[in-house]
Amino acid sequence: MGFRDIHAFNLAMLAKQAWRLTQDTHSLFYRVYKAKYFSSCSFIEAVLASNRSFVWRSLFSAREVIRVGSIWSIGDGGTASIKSHRWLLHPRTFHDGMDTSLKVREFIDPHTKQWDRGKVNDWFLPPSRDEVLGTRLGRLDGPDMLVWNENKSRTFSVLLAYQVALRIHWRSCAEHSRVWDDEWIWNKLWKLPIPPKKCDSSALNFLSLARSLVEKLSRKDLEMWAMVAWSIWNARNRAQFEATQTPPHAILKGAVLLLDEHQRLTRSVAPR
C-alpha cells in the first residue's frame, strides 16, 4: 500500500468516527463535541479554529470525505440550504439574483406537499430545474437527513469512504497537475555547487536502511516499521504545512491502530 493509499485509508477511518457527529445526536460522544466545537451549527458547517485539539482536527480533516460521499435526503426542507448543502446529485444552477441562503422548504408548496413548480421554474436553471422537480418528496413530517450516498442501503462504509478519499485525492492531483512543470527547477537546484543536504555515500541513507531491514526483519516487523516510518513522515508534513504538532507516543499509537484496522478490514473483505 502506497503513501497515498494509507492516507486515504486513514481519512476513511476518521470519517467513520466523524460520521457519528452527523447521525448519533443523542450519544455522549456527539453531545461533548457539539458543546465544545460546533454548538451553534452542525458538524458539516463547523469552522476549524487554530487552538483546537489534535483529535478534533483529525476528525475535521475527514469532513470532506463525508461531504463528497453523502447527500441530504429532503424531509420538511427546513435544514438543507439550496446552495451550501448537497441535496441534488449534480451541481445546482440558478437564475441571477437568486437568494442562495434560502432553505429547500421555500420551494415546497405547504398545501399540496409537492414542489412549487412556479418558484422552481423562476429560480432554477435547467437541468437543475428538472432534477428538483424529479426529486421525490416523501417525508415532509420529518427533518432533512444526511445520508450516505455511495451504496443503495445508504449506510456508511469504511471501504466506500476509502474510495471517496481516493477520488478526492485524484481530483486534487488533476487540479494541481501543473506542479510537474516545475521539475526543471528541482533539477537545477540539485546541480548547484553547494554542500549536499543529504547523506553522502559513506553514510546510511533511507534506501540503504530499508534494504537492510527487508533482509533482516520478519514480515510482521517490516509491516510495523513501514507503518511507523510513514506515520513519522506524515506527522512531519502536518507540522510543516498545518502547524499541527503530534506527540511521539500518539504517532506510534496511531500507526499501530491504523495497521491493525487495515489488516482487519482487508481480511474481512478478502475473497474466500
Image (tube, grey):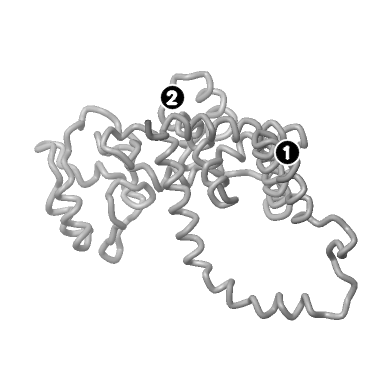
Amino acid at dot 1: Leu
Q: Is residue 127 above or below residue 236?
A: below
Q: Is residue 232 above or below residue 119?
A: above
Say left or right for 150 vs 140: right
**Residue 254 visible in the picture:** no
In which quadrant of the rendered view does residue 253 lie? top right
Q: Nearer the viewer, residue 153 or 113?
A: 153
Residue 103: image x %, image y %? 31, 44
Q: Which residue is mark 1?
A: 217
Split into 4 quadrants, where in the image is the C terminus?
Answer: top left
Q: Quick one: which residue is furthest to the front in this view?
A: 215
Q: Nearer the viewer, residue 244 or 121?
A: 244
Q: Nearer the viewer, residue 101 or 222?
A: 222
Tell me what residue is drawn at x 75 percent, y 44 percent: 213
Residue 126: image x %, image y %? 19, 62
Q: Nearer the viewer, residue 106 or 132?
A: 132
Say left or right for 37 vs 213: left
- Mark 2 or mark 1: which comes first in sequence? 2
Which of label 2 and label 1 is nearer to you? 1
Q: Determine the CA span between mark 2 and mark 1.
A: 46 Å
Tell me what residue is drawn at x 38 percent, y 44 percent: 69
In which quadrant of the rendered view does residue 72 lie? top left
Q: Secondary structure at mark 1?
A: loop
Amino acid at dot 2: Thr
Q: Which residue is mark 2?
A: 25
Residue 174: image x %, image y %? 47, 66
Label at residue 45: none
Say left or right for 13 vs 187: left
